[in-house]
Image (spheres, rainbow, N blue to C red):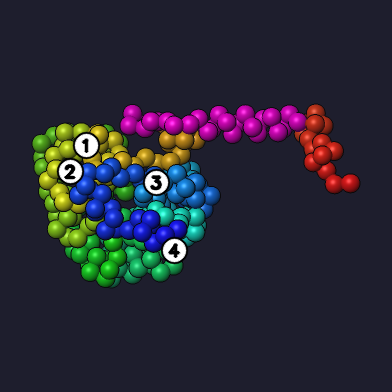
Amino acid sequence: MAPSDIITVPRISAMKARGEKITCLTAYDWLTAGLLDAAGIDIILVGDSGAMVFAGHETTLPITMEQMLYHAAAVSRGVKRGLVIADMPFLSYQVSGDQALENAGRFLKESGAAGVKLEGGRRIADTVRRIVSAGIPVMGHLGLTPQSIRSFGDYRVRGEVQDEAGAIREDARILEEAGAFAVVLEKIPAGLAAEITQSLSIPTIGIGAGPHCDGQVIVTPDMLGLFESFRPKFVRRYAELAETIRTAASRFADDVKNGRFPSDEESFK
Ligand code: KIV
Protein backbone atom coordinates (compact mmCIF):
# COMPACT_ATOMS: atom_id res chain seq x y z
CA MET A 1 0.00 0.00 0.00
CA ALA A 2 1.49 3.37 -1.03
CA PRO A 3 1.69 5.81 1.91
CA SER A 4 -0.43 8.27 -0.12
CA ASP A 5 -3.31 5.74 -0.11
CA ILE A 6 -3.44 5.43 3.68
CA ILE A 7 -6.22 7.34 5.41
CA THR A 8 -4.94 9.79 8.01
CA VAL A 9 -6.66 12.42 10.15
CA PRO A 10 -5.59 15.25 7.78
CA ARG A 11 -7.04 13.26 4.86
CA ILE A 12 -10.37 12.98 6.71
CA SER A 13 -10.36 16.76 7.25
CA ALA A 14 -9.55 17.31 3.57
CA MET A 15 -12.51 15.14 2.56
CA LYS A 16 -14.87 17.57 4.31
CA ALA A 17 -13.13 20.52 2.66
CA ARG A 18 -13.71 19.10 -0.82
CA GLY A 19 -17.20 17.77 -0.07
CA GLU A 20 -16.29 14.09 -0.33
CA LYS A 21 -18.48 11.88 1.87
CA ILE A 22 -16.72 9.88 4.60
CA THR A 23 -17.56 6.21 5.22
CA CYS A 24 -17.30 4.57 8.63
CA LEU A 25 -18.24 1.08 9.82
CA THR A 26 -17.62 -0.68 13.12
CA ALA A 27 -15.43 -3.76 13.57
CA TYR A 28 -14.45 -5.86 16.56
CA ASP A 29 -12.23 -8.54 14.97
CA TRP A 30 -9.36 -8.97 12.50
CA LEU A 31 -11.32 -10.87 9.86
CA THR A 32 -14.19 -8.39 9.50
CA ALA A 33 -11.87 -5.39 9.73
CA GLY A 34 -9.81 -6.71 6.81
CA LEU A 35 -12.93 -7.17 4.67
CA LEU A 36 -14.23 -3.67 5.42
CA ASP A 37 -10.80 -2.20 4.73
CA ALA A 38 -10.53 -4.03 1.41
CA ALA A 39 -13.93 -2.55 0.47
CA GLY A 40 -12.43 0.94 0.92
CA ILE A 41 -14.16 2.04 4.13
CA ASP A 42 -12.41 5.22 5.34
CA ILE A 43 -12.81 4.90 9.13
CA ILE A 44 -13.00 1.56 10.95
CA LEU A 45 -14.48 2.26 14.37
CA VAL A 46 -13.81 -0.21 17.17
CA GLY A 47 -17.09 0.68 18.82
CA ASP A 48 -18.04 -0.09 22.39
CA SER A 49 -21.22 -1.33 20.68
CA GLY A 50 -19.14 -4.53 20.71
CA ALA A 51 -20.41 -4.94 24.29
CA MET A 52 -23.85 -5.54 22.75
CA VAL A 53 -23.37 -6.99 19.26
CA PHE A 54 -20.23 -9.02 20.01
CA ALA A 55 -20.56 -9.91 23.70
CA GLY A 56 -24.34 -9.94 24.17
CA HIS A 57 -24.68 -7.30 26.91
CA GLU A 58 -27.82 -5.14 27.05
CA THR A 59 -25.90 -1.84 27.01
CA THR A 60 -22.40 -0.62 26.15
CA LEU A 61 -21.59 0.02 29.81
CA PRO A 62 -19.91 -3.25 30.88
CA ILE A 63 -17.08 -3.37 28.32
CA THR A 64 -13.66 -2.77 29.91
CA MET A 65 -10.41 -1.08 28.81
CA GLU A 66 -8.70 -4.48 28.50
CA GLN A 67 -11.51 -5.85 26.34
CA MET A 68 -11.54 -2.74 24.11
CA LEU A 69 -7.74 -2.97 23.75
CA TYR A 70 -8.06 -6.61 22.69
CA HIS A 71 -10.67 -5.74 20.03
CA ALA A 72 -8.74 -2.66 18.85
CA ALA A 73 -5.51 -4.64 18.44
CA ALA A 74 -7.27 -7.36 16.44
CA VAL A 75 -8.94 -4.75 14.20
CA SER A 76 -5.69 -2.80 13.70
CA ARG A 77 -3.95 -5.98 12.51
CA GLY A 78 -6.60 -6.36 9.80
CA VAL A 79 -6.55 -2.77 8.50
CA LYS A 80 -3.96 -1.59 5.98
CA ARG A 81 -5.62 1.55 4.58
CA GLY A 82 -8.41 2.84 6.82
CA LEU A 83 -8.20 5.01 9.92
CA VAL A 84 -8.76 2.89 13.04
CA ILE A 85 -10.51 4.77 15.84
CA ALA A 86 -11.18 3.08 19.19
CA ASP A 87 -14.03 3.91 21.54
CA MET A 88 -12.93 4.79 25.05
CA PRO A 89 -15.19 2.66 27.27
CA PHE A 90 -17.44 3.96 30.03
CA LEU A 91 -15.43 5.27 33.03
CA SER A 92 -12.09 5.10 31.20
CA TYR A 93 -12.00 8.92 30.73
CA GLN A 94 -14.46 10.42 33.25
CA VAL A 95 -12.60 9.89 36.53
CA SER A 96 -9.68 12.28 35.90
CA GLY A 97 -7.70 13.95 33.12
CA ASP A 98 -4.66 11.82 34.02
CA GLN A 99 -6.66 8.63 33.75
CA ALA A 100 -8.17 9.73 30.42
CA LEU A 101 -4.80 10.61 28.89
CA GLU A 102 -3.20 7.40 30.07
CA ASN A 103 -6.03 5.27 28.72
CA ALA A 104 -6.19 7.15 25.40
CA GLY A 105 -2.45 6.64 25.02
CA ARG A 106 -2.80 2.90 25.63
CA PHE A 107 -4.96 2.59 22.52
CA LEU A 108 -2.19 4.08 20.36
CA LYS A 109 0.70 2.29 22.09
CA GLU A 110 -0.81 -1.13 22.70
CA SER A 111 -3.45 -1.61 19.98
CA GLY A 112 -2.18 0.36 17.00
CA ALA A 113 -5.36 2.47 16.75
CA ALA A 114 -4.84 5.95 15.26
CA GLY A 115 -7.21 7.80 17.59
CA VAL A 116 -9.96 7.53 20.17
CA LYS A 117 -13.64 8.43 20.46
CA LEU A 118 -15.23 9.92 23.59
CA GLU A 119 -18.89 10.66 24.33
CA GLY A 120 -19.96 14.11 25.53
CA GLY A 121 -19.42 17.81 24.88
CA ARG A 122 -18.87 20.60 27.41
CA ARG A 123 -18.33 18.22 30.34
CA ILE A 124 -15.39 16.46 28.63
CA ALA A 125 -13.90 19.49 26.81
CA ASP A 126 -10.86 19.78 29.13
CA THR A 127 -10.21 16.07 28.77
CA VAL A 128 -10.39 16.34 24.96
CA ARG A 129 -7.92 19.27 25.05
CA ARG A 130 -5.55 17.28 27.23
CA ILE A 131 -5.63 14.17 25.00
CA VAL A 132 -5.31 16.19 21.77
CA SER A 133 -2.37 18.15 23.14
CA ALA A 134 -0.55 14.84 23.65
CA GLY A 135 -0.86 14.22 19.90
CA ILE A 136 -3.77 11.78 20.11
CA PRO A 137 -6.59 12.42 17.62
CA VAL A 138 -10.02 12.60 19.24
CA MET A 139 -13.42 11.99 17.68
CA GLY A 140 -16.39 13.37 19.63
CA HIS A 141 -19.84 11.79 19.96
CA LEU A 142 -23.05 13.76 20.63
CA GLY A 143 -26.81 13.21 20.57
CA LEU A 144 -27.91 9.80 21.76
CA THR A 145 -24.69 8.86 23.53
CA PRO A 146 -25.21 5.24 24.61
CA GLN A 147 -22.93 5.46 27.66
CA SER A 148 -25.52 7.86 29.17
CA ILE A 149 -28.45 5.53 28.60
CA ARG A 150 -29.11 5.18 32.34
CA SER A 151 -29.55 8.98 32.58
CA PHE A 152 -31.56 9.26 29.34
CA GLY A 153 -33.79 6.33 30.33
CA ASP A 154 -34.63 5.44 26.71
CA TYR A 155 -33.29 5.40 23.16
CA ARG A 156 -35.53 8.19 21.77
CA VAL A 157 -34.28 10.83 19.32
CA ARG A 158 -32.28 13.55 21.10
CA GLY A 159 -32.48 17.26 20.24
CA GLU A 160 -36.16 17.35 19.30
CA VAL A 161 -36.88 20.01 21.90
CA GLN A 162 -35.24 23.42 21.63
CA ASP A 163 -33.18 23.30 24.83
CA GLU A 164 -31.70 19.95 23.97
CA ALA A 165 -31.01 20.98 20.36
CA GLY A 166 -29.26 24.12 21.61
CA ALA A 167 -27.09 22.09 23.99
CA ILE A 168 -26.06 19.69 21.20
CA ARG A 169 -25.22 22.64 18.90
CA GLU A 170 -23.14 24.23 21.65
CA ASP A 171 -21.41 20.92 22.52
CA ALA A 172 -20.42 20.48 18.85
CA ARG A 173 -18.85 23.94 18.79
CA ILE A 174 -17.02 23.23 22.07
CA LEU A 175 -15.64 19.93 20.77
CA GLU A 176 -14.34 21.63 17.64
CA GLU A 177 -12.71 24.33 19.75
CA ALA A 178 -11.19 21.68 22.06
CA GLY A 179 -9.43 20.10 19.07
CA ALA A 180 -11.60 17.11 18.10
CA PHE A 181 -10.98 16.16 14.45
CA ALA A 182 -14.54 14.88 13.83
CA VAL A 183 -17.79 14.34 15.69
CA VAL A 184 -20.34 11.54 15.54
CA LEU A 185 -23.96 12.77 15.67
CA GLU A 186 -26.24 9.96 16.80
CA LYS A 187 -30.03 9.88 16.47
CA ILE A 188 -30.81 13.59 16.15
CA PRO A 189 -33.18 15.33 13.70
CA ALA A 190 -31.77 15.66 10.16
CA GLY A 191 -32.28 19.45 10.18
CA LEU A 192 -30.25 19.90 13.37
CA ALA A 193 -27.46 17.66 12.00
CA ALA A 194 -27.42 19.69 8.76
CA GLU A 195 -27.13 22.92 10.71
CA ILE A 196 -24.26 21.59 12.87
CA THR A 197 -22.50 20.16 9.79
CA GLN A 198 -22.62 23.55 8.09
CA SER A 199 -21.42 25.43 11.13
CA LEU A 200 -18.36 23.26 11.88
CA SER A 201 -15.05 23.07 10.04
CA ILE A 202 -14.55 19.48 11.30
CA PRO A 203 -16.51 16.61 9.72
CA THR A 204 -19.72 15.25 11.22
CA ILE A 205 -20.33 11.50 10.95
CA GLY A 206 -24.02 10.69 11.27
CA ILE A 207 -25.86 7.65 12.56
CA GLY A 208 -29.58 8.23 12.47
CA ALA A 209 -28.84 11.92 11.80
CA GLY A 210 -30.04 12.27 8.22
CA PRO A 211 -28.27 12.65 4.89
CA HIS A 212 -26.53 16.01 5.34
CA CYS A 213 -23.67 14.91 7.60
CA ASP A 214 -20.18 14.79 6.11
CA GLY A 215 -20.09 11.03 6.59
CA GLN A 216 -22.17 8.08 7.73
CA VAL A 217 -21.55 5.26 10.19
CA ILE A 218 -23.53 2.08 10.83
CA VAL A 219 -22.88 -0.71 13.31
CA THR A 220 -21.63 -3.45 10.97
CA PRO A 221 -23.61 -6.43 12.38
CA ASP A 222 -26.75 -4.25 11.92
CA MET A 223 -26.08 -3.47 8.27
CA LEU A 224 -25.07 -7.08 7.56
CA GLY A 225 -28.33 -8.38 9.05
CA LEU A 226 -26.40 -10.35 11.68
CA PHE A 227 -27.74 -8.61 14.80
CA GLU A 228 -31.45 -9.36 15.01
CA SER A 229 -32.37 -8.43 18.60
CA PHE A 230 -33.71 -5.05 17.46
CA ARG A 231 -33.52 -2.97 14.30
CA PRO A 232 -33.39 0.82 14.58
CA LYS A 233 -35.24 2.82 11.87
CA PHE A 234 -31.94 4.31 10.63
CA VAL A 235 -30.37 0.94 9.79
CA ARG A 236 -30.30 -0.13 6.16
CA ARG A 237 -29.52 -3.81 5.74
CA TYR A 238 -27.09 -4.59 2.92
CA ALA A 239 -27.09 -8.37 3.58
CA GLU A 240 -29.03 -10.99 5.53
CA LEU A 241 -26.09 -12.84 7.07
CA ALA A 242 -27.96 -14.25 10.08
CA GLU A 243 -30.18 -16.22 7.72
CA THR A 244 -27.18 -17.25 5.57
CA ILE A 245 -25.35 -18.57 8.67
CA ARG A 246 -28.40 -20.43 10.01
CA THR A 247 -28.94 -22.08 6.61
CA ALA A 248 -25.26 -23.04 6.25
CA ALA A 249 -25.12 -24.48 9.79
CA SER A 250 -28.27 -26.51 9.31
CA ARG A 251 -27.01 -27.85 5.95
CA PHE A 252 -23.75 -28.88 7.68
CA ALA A 253 -25.70 -30.59 10.48
CA ASP A 254 -27.92 -32.39 7.96
CA ASP A 255 -24.88 -33.62 5.97
CA VAL A 256 -23.12 -34.90 9.11
CA LYS A 257 -26.22 -36.60 10.55
CA ASN A 258 -26.88 -38.32 7.22
CA GLY A 259 -23.28 -39.41 6.57
CA ARG A 260 -22.74 -37.05 3.59
CA PHE A 261 -19.86 -35.13 5.20
CA PRO A 262 -16.98 -35.67 4.85
CA SER A 263 -16.85 -37.32 1.41
CA ASP A 264 -13.91 -39.48 0.17
CA GLU A 265 -12.51 -36.34 -1.57
CA GLU A 266 -12.55 -34.50 1.74
CA SER A 267 -10.75 -37.38 3.53
CA PHE A 268 -7.11 -38.61 3.53
CA LYS A 269 -6.19 -42.06 2.12
O1 KIV B 1 -20.02 2.04 19.59
C1 KIV B 1 -20.35 2.32 18.43
O2 KIV B 1 -20.50 1.47 17.55
C2 KIV B 1 -20.59 3.72 18.12
C3 KIV B 1 -21.27 4.03 16.83
C4 KIV B 1 -22.71 3.77 16.98
C5 KIV B 1 -20.99 5.40 16.38
O3 KIV B 1 -20.28 4.57 18.90
- Looking at marks 3 and 2 on the same chain, the residue that comes earlier in the sequence is marked by 3
Picture residue at 53% right of the left edge, 49% below the top: 31
Asked whether 88 or 82 is in front, the reply is: 82
Left or right: where 73 falls relative to 60: right
Give, as a three-letter code, the residue at label 2. Thr
Residue 181 makes an appearance in the image: yes
Badge nearest the viewer, 4 or 3: 3
Q: Main secondary structure of the magenta part?
A: helix
Q: Is residue 191 magenta?
A: no
- Looking at marks 4 and 1 on the same chain, the residue that comes earlier in the sequence is marked by 4
Residue 49 x, y percent position in the rendering = 40, 46
Element under disc 3: loop
Q: Is the residue indicated by label 2 positioned so its CB lies within 8 Å of ligand 1?
A: no
The part of the chain drawn in magenta is 231-255
Question: Where, by quadrant of the figure, is residue 107 drawn?
Answer: bottom left
Q: Is residue 257 above or below residue 50?
A: above
Q: Which residue is mark 3?
A: 41
Separation of residues labelled 1 and 3 (CA atoms)? 19 Å
Q: Which residue is mark 4?
A: 111
On-image quarter of the N terminus? bottom left
Left or right: where 203 falls relative to 80: left
Give, as a three-letter code, the residue at label 3. Ile
Give, as a three-letter code, the residue at label 4. Ser
Question: Where, by quadrant of the figure, is residue 236 drawn?
Answer: top left
Element under disc 2: helix
Q: Which residue is mark 1?
A: 212
Separation of residues labelled 4 and 1 (CA atoms)? 33 Å
- Looking at marks 4 and 3 on the same chain, the residue that comes earlier in the sequence is marked by 3
Crowd band around label 3 with a 10 angstrom C-alpha radius: few (<14), some (14–19), many (20+): some
Picture residue at 32% right of the left edge, 48% below the top: 147
Question: Which numbered dot is residue 197?
Answer: 2
